[in-house]
Image (spheres, rainbow, N blue to C red):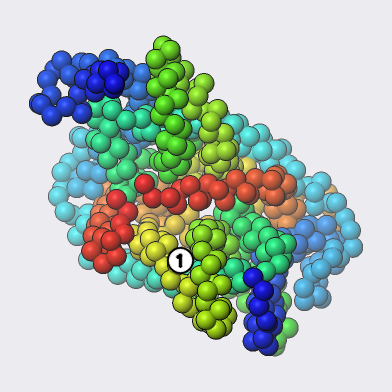
Amino acid sequence: MIEKKTWVDYTFDTINHIVLAAIAFVTLYPFWYVLCASFSDPNLFIRKDFVMLFKPLGFTLEAYKQCLTPRVLSGYGNTLFYVVAGTLISMFLTFLGAYALSRKGWMGKRFITLMIMFTMYFSGGIIAIYLWVEQLGLVDTVWAVLLPTALSTYNMIVMRTAFASVPESLIEAAKLDGASEFTCLFKIVIPLSQATIAVVVLFYAVWRWNDWMSATIFLRSSSLYPLQIFLREILLTSSADSIVSTGGSSVNTTALAEIIKYATIVVATVPVLCIYPFIQKYFVSGVMIGGVKE
Amino acid sequence: MPSKTSAQAADPLQLKHRLTWKDVRKNLYKYRGIYIMLIPVLIYYIMFCYAPLQGLQIAFRDFRPGRGIWGSRWIGWENFEMFFTGPYFLSRLRNTLLISLYTIVVCFPAPILFALLLNEVRNKYFKKIVQTVSYLPHFISLVVVCGLVKEFVSTTGLINQIIEMFGGEAANMLMDPGKFRGIYVISELWQTIGWNSIIYLAALAGVNTELYDAAAVDGAGRFRRIWSITIPSIMPTVIIMFIMRIGQFMSVGFDKIILLYNENIYETADIISSFVYRKGIIEANYSYSMAVSLVNSVVNFLLVVLVNKISAKVSETSLW
């Protein structure tokens, strides 16, 4: 399309680019600030004689040496376990449910769909779930974190949309050759839905990585805590003295504690930031599939 | 085609006559694989979505853990009366409604505007970079986001440094009841503006470009085209998203609230669901908090149904 640009267009384009660049800056700057602060010399940083931080003040790795405490490391380990085990359980249930809902003809489909959809709009709330999980004797076990949130109805519907787009004729043909429903699911439908499976796996995995609510409600022993619980302690509820370990008499405790907080944020966020550029396009396509109305 | 007729005969749901036990058995046998697959899924829904609902009755009981849910004394509406006549009901309801309202007013239109602005950018790389950057906060855990917010609004934090630069006075904003809702809404905007624009960008990508060319030939300027072509073409998406958003009006995420608030600012920050969390999970006051939670769930559910009814009438677009 060729057209003449008027001065209105030029002005609009300029302002538009400035506004968008400003939004990008405001989104990105907090991360940059945290990164710079985490490498800064605590004594220089605490004086705060700068307005905005664009590079580290001095350079020290002290905060990184102190932030990787045994607790944080065990949190990391537990989180990895919850992410892997949780995603596996979730995917297993999601595959089965999505496949059943994507097939036609079986009796009770309407009733079961209704029963599943109802849970999206009405739930008993956290007290009811807590009492029930306690009654089952699961409180303070890994199952309390893994099971109550094992299946996301939203993700299952996203998956069903993908499964339903596999041509019916392929499945019918396989069945004429004697294939069971399980064979159809694992040999035909799943291999043909890889893009959506990637999306759903990532939805579950990132959700698990970030989940702290289940652990706060159901866990008591700190040996089971995921990383996010320790993060909450360090970033939001603790005092400076409890963060800084012994030794450093030359540095101001408050100053060091603040730098350690920033280093902890970096340590906890880097894994997600590293894979983010590669996975974000899958997430975007996931939102689109989920947005499609049946 | 003989195969088609036999398929129909084997599928009782397609037949007009009444279902007989024979049909049921045939269907169960034909789709046995599917029924077996459904078992774990149904166990999940029954165990973790429906079975917990029996606990709702403790809202009407004086729950003692030793006696169990069914064995505790039935006291009727006492817990509800205590909540409705107590000092918390009005203030917690007001906080819930105001935080929800502010969030919708600010965070619902923002992604639409953002998508419209991005859509006007011709430079592919600039657009891609801004988009990718704007999705980033969505992937940062809520604990880290709240940690950042707390650091930035603390007395020596980034926001206060900027305020001081302009001659203002630094203060810990999370201790100031008047500032909590603002902090909540602005951080929410930071978290969601990019991510929530995806759906609108998708709708904008589907607009027929010939319309723009035709309008340009007819002499329509830039703003005229945005107003008469772009905006009408994403209106259906906007309406659907708005309905879904209104349906969640009462379900403000309390996880962010309990990460950010402190007892100094309960009067403006504590909402119904965070109140339930504190009374129930922390203070183990199960019956009372269940009553409060039940009120919230029921209002929320009725709101979804009502909004859906209205939208089905007004716009012929509904959720189900």
Residue B36: image location, x then y, percent: 35, 19
Q: Foreground: B24 or B8?
A: B8
Residue B7 visible, this orientation: no
Q: Foreground: A284 or B147?
A: A284
- Taking A247 as reference, is A254 left or right? left
Please state the chain letter of the residue tagged with numbered disc 1 in the rendered image: B
- Taking A132 as reference, is A54 left or right? right
Q: Foreground: A95 or B61?
A: A95
The residue positioned farthest toward the top in the image shown: A178
Residue B125 visible, this orientation: yes
Residue A238: image location, x then y, percent: 62, 54
Residue A235: image location, x then y, percent: 64, 55
Q: Compared to B48, does B276 lie above or below?
A: below
- Give the residue drawn at x 12%, y 20%: B20
The residue positioned farthest toward the right in the image shown: A58
Residue A54: image location, x then y, percent: 81, 68
Q: Which residue is mark 1?
A: B234
Within the image, what quadrant is residue B318 found in? Answer: bottom left
Circle 1 — which element? helix
Q: Compared to A166, does B207 lie above or below?
A: below
- Give the residue drawn at x 62%, y 53%: B140
- Give the residue drawn at x 81%, y 76%: A49
Look at the image and tell me in which quarter the N terminus of chain B lies. top left
Within the image, what quadrant is residue B26 found in? Answer: top left
Q: Amino acid at mark 1?
A: Ile
- Give the residue drawn at x 42%, y 62%: B237
Total count of labels: 1
Crowdedness of circle 1 by 10 Å Cα count: few (<14), some, many (20+)? many
